[in-house]
Image (cartoon, coloured by chain):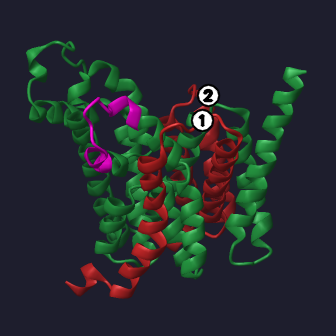
Amino acid sequence: MTLPPLDSPQWDGSLKAFAFGLRATSATILSVVLFVTFIGIGALAHDTHFSMLWAILSTVLVWAGPAQIILVSTLGSGQTILQSAIAVTMSAIRLFPMVVAVLPLIRGPNTKRRHLVLIAHFTAVTLWVECYRFLPHVPRERRIAFVHGLGSGLMAVALVATIIGYLLAANLSQTFGAAVLLLTPLAFLFSTLRNAKELADVLALGLGLVLYPVAAQLNSGVDILISGVVAGTIAFGAHKWRERREAA
Amino acid sequence: MSDFIGDWHALFVLLVAGVIPNQIWRLLGLWFGSGLDEGSDLLMWVKAVATAILAGVIAQILVQPPGALASVTWGLRYGAVVAGLAAFLASRRSIFAGVVCGEMVMLAGKWWLG
């Protein structure tokens, strides 16, 4: 999709900017990835015995695929509320630097903090990536409206997918039900690998995959946290070690 | 209708274990965001741990599969992911190619093995 030039009269009015943002969601492969991911999340919520409303609210209010999957699978495997909350909050820490990075792109001289609340809510990996791509082509005074449109569009895609996934899991044969559930690990594995820029990211992913089955033998109830902290710390250490060697 | 809503306890758990622990970080970003170095060691470590936790969840779904996925033998589950990974790498990191290939291998295998 090509947006009009920055000084075009087509940018007059917030509603038009909102519509451009909404339409931008149809111009990205990430919408397809988002759709596939949330089909998996809807199906997972069904097969771990959560209600349709629960699945819908989790997509609208949590709005973070990894956190939703962690929440569903930890609660589904019988862990306590506290253990789930800790695992969710660890996975959500990455939203903090994302919000910090996105807001300066959107903020103008007269922007108040309350104008940015909804944008902070919409911020997740997909919106983050798309802001870097689209915002240079959006006049600064229209960026809030544009991102509201973009975020609404992405959330609508995810919401429809959540509902479809939930219904599919309820009505499909066992084979196709299994295929829908397999979407989640595949989509997350490849999209995380694609976004991995540093050695530390790839190492953390690989070690996390390998160490979880080992940690699961402990049966501690916080196996995912244990394997995550150990694998993440090793990956970080390896990154620092390489950095220091290169500096020397 | 009650099937649609489910039980209120589960919705409360969603709020306490899902919504609040997640949104707190977006709010903190909104309030204290300015003047933070994105390349700092602390954030690097946090990012690595978050990635490894996500990897653990991916592994958990494959090792201890929920619902209908449990009907697929472990060899086929891992085989499908490895085949998807090969397609992802061969297609110069196309997520779509990886997902489609993994799914095809799983469905073909299940159909073949019965």
| Residue B23 x/y as whole percent | 43, 60
Q: Mark 1 points at which residue?
A: B37
Q: Which chain is painted in green? A: A
Magenta span includes A107:
yes
> In the displayed structure, does residue A37 sit left or right of residue A1?
right
Q: Quadrant of the N terminus of chain A?
A: top left
Q: Where is residue A189 in the image (x, y as percent from the top left)?
A: 58, 46
User: Residue visible at 25% across and 45% down?
Assistant: A115
Q: In this view, does B109 lie to the left or right of B2?
A: right
Q: In which quarter of the image is residue A212?
A: bottom right
Q: Position of residue B58 (x, y in %)?
A: 61, 57
> Which chain did the renderer colour red?
B
Which residues lie in the magenta part? A103-118
Instruction: Identify the chain of the residue marked 1, using the numbered disc in the image.
Output: B
- The image position of residue B90, as x and y in percent, is 61, 28
Say whether residue B103 is magenta.
no
Q: Which of B103 and A60 is in front in this view?
A: A60
Q: Which residue matches tag 2?
A: B90
Q: Is residue A97 above or below residue A107?
A: below
* Rendered residue at 60%/39% (across/down): A193
Secondary structure beneath dot 1 equals loop
> In which quadrant of the rendered image does the C terminus of chain A lie?
top right
Is A248 located above or below residue A20 in the figure?
A: above
Which amino acid, mark 2? Ala
Label 1 amino acid? Asp
Chain of the residue that carries numbered disc 2 in the rendered image: B
Left or right: residue B70 compared with residue B10: right
Which of A24 and A244 lies nearest the eye of the viewer? Answer: A244
Which label's residue is closer to the chain start, 2 or 1? 1
- Report whether mark 2 lies on the same chain as mark 1: yes
Dividing the picture into quarters, in which one does residue A11 lie? top left
Q: Residue at x 10, y 35 (%)?
A: A15
